[in-house]
């Protein structure tokens, strides 16, 4: 649970996760553009895609967890996309070079809960 009292699902859909705030957008704008993680998308498309991905349930190629601080993380094993979100919005959306190793590292650092049981 984060400081808002909202508890998101570790594995289910989380439709209430908001899009990235303007402050977060400014911190992550470097993921957009030629030679970047998302080379052919606009800022608006990037923001929407990040929120849509964070809201998705786990299953198939998508792994995910809820951190002890209330964050939600999703990782797509096929596309390499990784997203971290809170009740305040998407905090980070990227394709880390380390791929699944990056996901596992943050799973451990976040004290990730991989089921809702």
Image (cartoon, grey):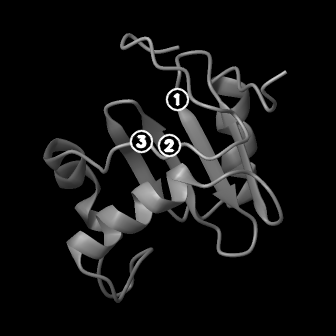
| Sequence-first disc among 1 and 2 | 1
Residue located 37% across and 85% down the image: 39
Q: Secondary structure at mark 3?
A: loop
| Sequence-first disc among 1 and 3 | 3
Q: Residues within 10 Å of mark 1 (few under 14, many from 20)?
A: many
Q: Secondary structure at mark 2?
A: strand
Q: Is residue 93 above or below residue 84?
A: below
Residue 2 sits in quarter: top left
Q: x, y (%) of residue 24?
A: 24, 45
Q: CA distance from mark 1 to mark 2?
A: 7 Å
Q: Nearer the viewer, residue 65 or 39?
A: 65
Q: Is residue 99 above or below residue 17?
A: below
Q: Quadrant of the C terminus?
A: top right
Check whether the beta carbons of the residues at disc 1 and disc 3 lie within 8 A of each other.
no
Q: Residues within 10 Å of mark 3 (few under 14, many from 20)?
A: some
Residue assigned mark 3: 17
Is residue 15 left or right of 9 when viewed as pictured?
A: left
| Sequence-first disc among 2 and 3 | 3
How many numbered circles are shown? 3
Check whether the beta carbons of the residues at disc 2 and disc 3 lie within 8 A of each other.
no
Residue assigned mark 1: 71
Residue located 38% across and 85% down the image: 35
Q: Nearer the viewer, residue 95 or 45?
A: 45
Q: CA distance from mark 1 to mark 3?
A: 10 Å
Q: Nearer the viewer, residue 104 or 116?
A: 116
């Amino acid at each position: 649970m984060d400081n808002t009292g909202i508890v998101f699902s570790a594995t289910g859909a989380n439709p209430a996760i908001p899009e990235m705030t303007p402050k977060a957008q400014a911190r992550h704008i470097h993921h957009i553009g030629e030679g970047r993680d998302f080379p052919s998308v606009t800022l608006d498309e990037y923001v929407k895609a990040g929120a849509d991905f964070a809201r998705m349930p786990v299953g198939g190629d998508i792994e995910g967890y809820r951190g002890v601080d209330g964050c939600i993380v999703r990782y797509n094993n096929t596309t390499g996309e990784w997203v971290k979100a809170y009740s305040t919005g998407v905090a980070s959306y990227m394709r880390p070079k380390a791929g699944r190793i990056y996901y596992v590292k943050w799973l451990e650092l976040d004290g990730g809960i991989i089921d809702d049981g």
